[in-house]
Amino acid sequence: MKFVYQYLKAYKIESILAPLFKMLEAIFELFVPLVVAAIIDVGITTNDTDYILRRCGLLLLLAAIGLAVAITAQFFAAKAAICSASKMREDLFFHIQDMSHGAMDELGSATLVTRITNDINQVQNGINMFLRLFLRSPFIVFGAMIMAFTVDAKVALIFLAVIPLLGLIVYRVMKSTLPMFRKIQQTLDTVLRIVSENLEGIRVIRAFGNEEVQEDAFVKKTGELYSRQIGAGKIQAFLNPATYIIVNLAVVFILWFSGLRVEKGVLSTGEVVALVNYMSQILVELIKLANLIVLLTRAYSSVTRIQEVMEHPADERGHEGVASKALGEEVLGLSEVDFSYPNTVEHVLHDISFQLKSGETLGVIGGTGSGKSSLVHAICHDYDVARGMVRLVGEDVRGISDEQIAKVVGVVPQHAELFAGSIAENLRVGNPTATDDELWEALDTACAREVVEGKDGKLQAGVVKGGRNFSGGQRQRLTIARALVKRPWILILDDSASALDLATEAKLRQNIKSLSWKPATIIISQRASSVREADQILVLENGEVAGLGTHEELMRSCEVYQEIYYSQFPREEVGA
């Protein structure tokens, strides 16, 4: 409740008025059986038509006022629930944005999506119904019991026996379903993960004819979700018949005892009807209360899961003004860096050291799994290094915020990714204030001008999710242009020219080399031709430095580099 209260307190007025208006509605409702009793005992008994009509008019007035009050209460409850859930969703989204890559890997994207959608909706429904019923239903139950005592104290003792029994049933149902709903939400996470993985990897699945395996996995997990939901539903379904049986038995006893008291002249017919009506009101409100408890049980489970995410510490680092510092000799430096991913013991990078100055180009080459992309994660501080130091413009990267790193480091990832929108919107991701001239300049550097000019609308041409309306090479050039738009001090091309032909790639490297702001460039590639002209070439093998130097130096001293080079350029071709 403390977690939910911090969002509801911004809507205190609505949160107070909603239950108060509901209680006012309940008060009007409690007077109805007394009016009906008066109609029977006075109007019908004496055949007084005017009295009956006046009392029926009073009933209509009570109904009209009750309806107006109920609508007002539901408006305030809905406003408080929707607004507080919206703020909760916003805070959760921003917190996820601030979480470290390690924390996000630990939780998983499927879990985060479920919690920001389904769990928030469950909390919203719980708040809405809680504000509407948490005072009204108990007030009706105990109010009806008190009103029954004002009619006849002895018959009202039946109410005292029924209410605790119904409360015990509701408590047992709540205790049984709470852990079940937690497991249902966990299973829903897994189903969402399977769906997400299948949608993202549909081409790979089809290429390997793996549809049946994936269908079986999906059916198995959805079957598990179905079984758990049915199990919880069966327990919930027990509530209504159990309460109906108990309350209707109570009505039978009320009619029996009150009938005996009518014969003795202690009770009137109208009072018997009033007692039955009060018991019926209790029945209706207890069913509502039972459903409320089911909703609150789900909401409690969802709140717990949301809190788990919110309690993950944000990636809080210093906010030194690295982007405003003057460029020195060293733009990037690594000193004896060991790097491993969270929850793993083995280092994927070991003892990596090099320096990079403004305007220099570092080529990184190595076999598959040698740690090339992990080097990017270490430089950008996606994860902490296990040992050593990564220096960005002379500062330890562990003391620099993500925002500051993003200002000076431009990364073109291995897998080109574009967002739904226009080409201009995609290019301005790193620099929202960039002019159209700056966009065209970046496109020229990335050899992507013809890509844009060939589209209707040019810079305003549409981009579908993932950039599926562009070829692989076009996507790569657009993502390179996107990184260039913000004029980074360090430009990292993580195998981002693999879909380009050799001539276009050579022109791209030449264009980057001639940039006016002279960024330090890191070219990560499996092509020897992509790195051979770099000022330094870092050769990685099994996460360790196999060689560091120029192409000529490595051709003389590094066997790993020689092996890579000759595998791509046979000795006969090199000799020619």
Image (cartoon, rainbow, N blue to C red):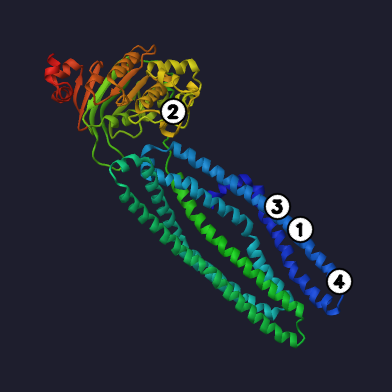
The answer to whether mark 3 and mark 2 are in CB contact below 8 A is no
Q: Earlier in the sequence, mark 1 or mark 2?
A: 1
Give the residue displayed 74% in from the left and 71% down from the top: 33
* Cα–Cα span, label 2 and label 4: 77 Å
Considering only vertical position in the picture, is 529 above or below 226? above
Indicate the amino acid at tag 1: Ile
Residue shown at the point (39%, 47%) measured from the top left? 195
- 3D distance between C-alphas at marks 1 and 4: 21 Å
**Residue pointed to by mark 3:** 72
In this rendering, position of residue 28 left or right of residue 387? right
**Closer to us: mark 4 or mark 3?**
4
Residue 408: x and y in percent read 40, 22
The first of marks 2 and 4 along the sequence is 4
Density class for disc 3 (Cα within 10 Å; few <14, some 14-19, many ≥20) is: some
- Give the image quarter of residue 351: top left
CB under 8 Å between callouts 3 and 1?
no
Instruction: Identify the residue position indicated by label 1 in the image.
Output: 65
The residues bearing labels 3 and 1 have C-alpha atoms spaced at a distance of: 11 Å
Residue type beneath disc 4: Tyr
Circle 2 or circle 4, nearest the eye: 4
- Counting residues from the start of the chain, the first of labels 4 and 3 encountered is 4
3D distance between C-alphas at marks 4 and 3: 32 Å
Q: Residue 354 location in percent, x, y?
A: 25, 22
Question: The disc labelled 2 sits on which kind of residue?
Answer: Glu
Mark 2 nearby-residue class (10 Å; few <14, some 14–19, many ≥20) = few
Q: SS for tag 2?
A: helix
Identify the residue position indicated by label 2 in the image: 403
Please say if 210 is above or below 167. above
The amino acid sitting under disc 3 is Thr
Cα separation between marks 1 and 2:
56 Å
